[in-house]
């Protein structure tokens, strides 16, 4: 495909690079189509290509650790990932397309070739890219300065009351007295609800759906309901999250988190209605934002929504890992090596078969996560305190569930028994166990990568992992398998979280599980670190693995396990005798078979072909 003139003109105008230079630069590129909601690249991963957006648009977002922010939208004609020109540079943002996109790409390898073969062109383009990046930095600096000016004004304090008395609250913040008490009571981990964007999104969706249902059923007037919905929409757009200052570790079965959401939404709603924060006569956190609800139905429903949202990110990253393993399986399909059982030589296989098995492991783990997520579609909205629906109007439970399903995009259904659903944390246990399964499988793969790359002189040395950093402060030249080691530790943490979730769910007594806050933390944090681990393992390890083909084949030729493949041809007893002699003398099975005239070199080499050694076939007679 030849790049359209209009696209080149747009790209030249936005980048400052001449059309002629762009044409030469992208001459060896290729077109890549991305499906809706597909990720082009992930923050912190190495840049692999530079490109021009031909069709559609790309959203840039930043934030790996539970909360992300929109940075920019890149339109057709824009250069994207041009930082690939900067050696050793990693993506500072993640990029995905909401509605699909087509990008013309040139790989890092071809950029390096351009640097070698067309040096003048390379540096002309590089200089313009540097100018463009500097221009963006100036704009960003200006925006940050304006934002700082806009948000640094503190107007004073307001008095708020709850059943325990009066407290003074900074008029700058949107949370209220109950959040203030929670901040003082639970200064435990320093990890706040604000760290988990999907949990805030889940709370906003719950409060919006409740307001809409309450308006329909006549228990909330339109002005109040509309103000609540607008405030929730702002939360869903990423605003006001810094006001969710409650620690994830808290008592009260999530009451502090629920009240924080109620207070933030009420105070922002008051501003929308034209009142001041804290003037709760006009819009109250409990009477209006929490209308027809209890923490005991709103909070677990919000957790379920946040897990469903987090699951989308996790499975996307696992898909990237699976795809990287599939590509390596294809690349290594002709690399013969020894299979091992119980760390002892077994029978030959291909390195491709090994990586193909890993890809299937990841796929099976993803499928299990999808199945576990189905239980999260059953929610207990309308249960209020214990499942009886006290303080909610007739028809509320059904209607709020229908509305929440519509605005969230998930196929939510009302639980058959709201009393059971309010006290039973079994679905959380199921998801936690499934995450543990995924962690076990990912960690097993990392263990194998560390073994196969061990050495390089005194270990297996069957594969080379990408060298990511010097491995020792004292031993020069040492390079450690740091990425598999990192992911192993992530997996250990996820496995440990499963034990905590099990104990927390078991602690459900009578009509409520009081330990849902730690369940929320462990599920959401576990999914987040496992997602980041899969992205890192794929991009910084799997894609760069190289096979040491001669080493792998040498192990096969010298392995005692080779005789197993010869049994159908030369018989069990002669094979056992060869194995015994090889063990005693240290000789090669391959050479001993030829010395004794049991097979010719041609026959033996034919049997050692990967396609003949690794699949069932008709055994040739001697």
Image (cartoon, rainbow, N blue to C red):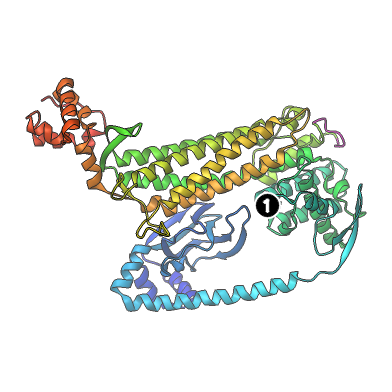
Assign a secondary structure to mark 1.
loop
Q: In this view, does 519 lie to the left or right of 259?
A: left
Residue that label 1 marks? 191
Residue 596 position, x and y percent, is 7, 29
Q: Is residue 289 left or right of residue 368?
A: right
* Residue 444 visible, this orientation: yes
Looking at the rendered structure, the number of numbered marks drawn on it comes to: 1
Q: Which residue lies furthest to the front in this view?
A: 474
Residue at 44% across, 54% down: 539
| Screen quadrant of the N terminus | bottom left
Q: Is residue 341 above or below residue 272?
A: above
Residue under the point 55% across and 54% down: 99
- Can residue 27 be seen here? The reply is no
Left or right, 371 with reference to 17: right
The residue under the point 73% across, 74% down is: 149
For the C terminus, give its image quadrant.
top left
- Residue 264 in percent (x, y) is at 79, 55
Locate residue 393: give its quadrant.
top right
| Left/right of residue 294 with respect to residue 558 in the rendered view | right
Density class for disc 1 (Cα within 10 Å; few <14, some 14-19, many ≥20) is some
Q: In this rendered view, identify the residue nearer to me: 580 or 548.
A: 580
Against 4, residue 197 (above or below) is above
Q: Does the magenta stretch include residue 388?
A: yes
- Residue stretch rendered in magenta on the structure: 387-393
Q: Verify whether residue 130 appears in magenta.
A: no
- The image position of residue 171, as x and y in percent, is 84, 64
- Magenta span: helix, strand or loop, mainly? loop
Q: Which residue is drawn at 83% across and 57% down?
A: 267
Residue 403, given in percent of the width and then of the height, sits at: 73, 42
């Amino acid at each position: 495909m030849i790049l359209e003139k209009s696209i080149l003109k747009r790209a030249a105008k936005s980048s400052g690079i001449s059309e002629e230079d762009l044409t030469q630069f992208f001459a060896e590129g290729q077109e890549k189509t991305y499906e809706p909601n597909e990720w082009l690249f992930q923050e912190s991963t190495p840049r692999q290509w530079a490109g021009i957006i031909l069709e559609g648009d790309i959203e840039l977002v930043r934030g790996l650790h539970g909360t992300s922010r929109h940075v920019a939208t890149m339109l057709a004609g824009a250069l994207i990932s041009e930082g690939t020109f900067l050696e050793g540079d990693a993506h500072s943002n993640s990029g995905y397309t909401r509605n699909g996109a087509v990008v013309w790409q040139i790989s890092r390898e071809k950029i390096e070739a351009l640097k070698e073969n067309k040096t003048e062109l390379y540096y002309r383009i590089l200089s313009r890219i540097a100018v463009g990046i500097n221009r963006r930095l100036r704009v960003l600096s200006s925006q940050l300065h304006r934002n700082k000016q806009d948000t640094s004004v503190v107007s004073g304090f307001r008095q708020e009351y709850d059943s325990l008395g009066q407290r003074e609250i900074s008029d700058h913040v949107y949370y209220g007295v109950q959040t203030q008490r929670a901040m003082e009571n639970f200064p435990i981990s320093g990890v706040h609800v604000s760290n988990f964007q999907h949990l805030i999104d889940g709370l906003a969706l719950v409060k919006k759906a409740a307001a809409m249902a309450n308006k329909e059923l006549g228990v909330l007037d339109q002005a109040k309901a509309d103000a609540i919905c607008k405030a929730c929409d702002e939360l869903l757009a990423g605003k006001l999250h810094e006001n969710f200052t409650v620690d994830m570790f808290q008592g009260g079965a999530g009451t502090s988190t629920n009240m924080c959401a109620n207070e933030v939404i009420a105070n922002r709603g008051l501003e929308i209605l034209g009142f001041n924060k804290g003037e709760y006569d006009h819009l109250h956190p409990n009477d209006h934002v929490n209308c027809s609800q209890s923490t005991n139905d709103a909070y677990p429903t919000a957790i379920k929504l946040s897990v469903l949202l987090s699951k989308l990110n996790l499975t996307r990253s696992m898909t990237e890992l699976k795809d990287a393993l599939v590509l390596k399986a294809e690349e290594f399909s002709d690399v013969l090596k020894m299979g091992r059982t119980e760390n002892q030589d077994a029978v030959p296989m291909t390195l491709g078969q090994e990586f193909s098995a890993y890809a299937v492991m990841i796929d099976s783990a993803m499928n299990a996560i999808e199945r576990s997520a189905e239980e999260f579609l059953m929610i207990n909205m309308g249960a209020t305190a214990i499942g009886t629906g006290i303080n909610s109007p007739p028809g509320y439970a059904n209607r709020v569930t229908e509305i929440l399903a519509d605005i969230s995009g998930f196929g939510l259904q009302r639980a058959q028994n709201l009393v059971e659903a309010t006290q039973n944390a079994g679905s959380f246990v199921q998801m936690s166990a499934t995450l543990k399964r995924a962690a076990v499988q990912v960690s097993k793969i990392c263990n194998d990568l560390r073994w196969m790359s061990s050495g390089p002189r005194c270990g297996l040395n069957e594969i080379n992992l990408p060298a990511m950093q010097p491995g020792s402060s004292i031993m020069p030249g040492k390079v450690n398998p740091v990425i598999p080691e990192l992911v192993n530790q992530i997996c250990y943490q996820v496995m440990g979280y499963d034990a905590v979730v099990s104990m927390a769910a078991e602690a459900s007594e009578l009509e409520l599980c009081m330990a849902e806050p730690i369940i929320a933390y462990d599920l959401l944090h576990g999914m987040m670190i496992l997602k980041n681990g899969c992205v890192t393992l794929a991009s910084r390890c799997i894609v760069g693995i190289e096979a040491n083909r001669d080493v792998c084949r040498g192990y096969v030729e010298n392995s005692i396990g080779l005789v197993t493949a010869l049994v159908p041809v030369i018989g069990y007893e002669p094979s056992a005798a060869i194995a015994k002699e090889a063990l005693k003398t240290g000789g090669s099975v391959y050479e001993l078979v030829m010395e004794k005239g049991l097979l010719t070199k041609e026959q033996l080499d034919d049997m050692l072909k990967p396609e003949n050694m690794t699949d069932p076939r008709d055994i040739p007679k001697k």
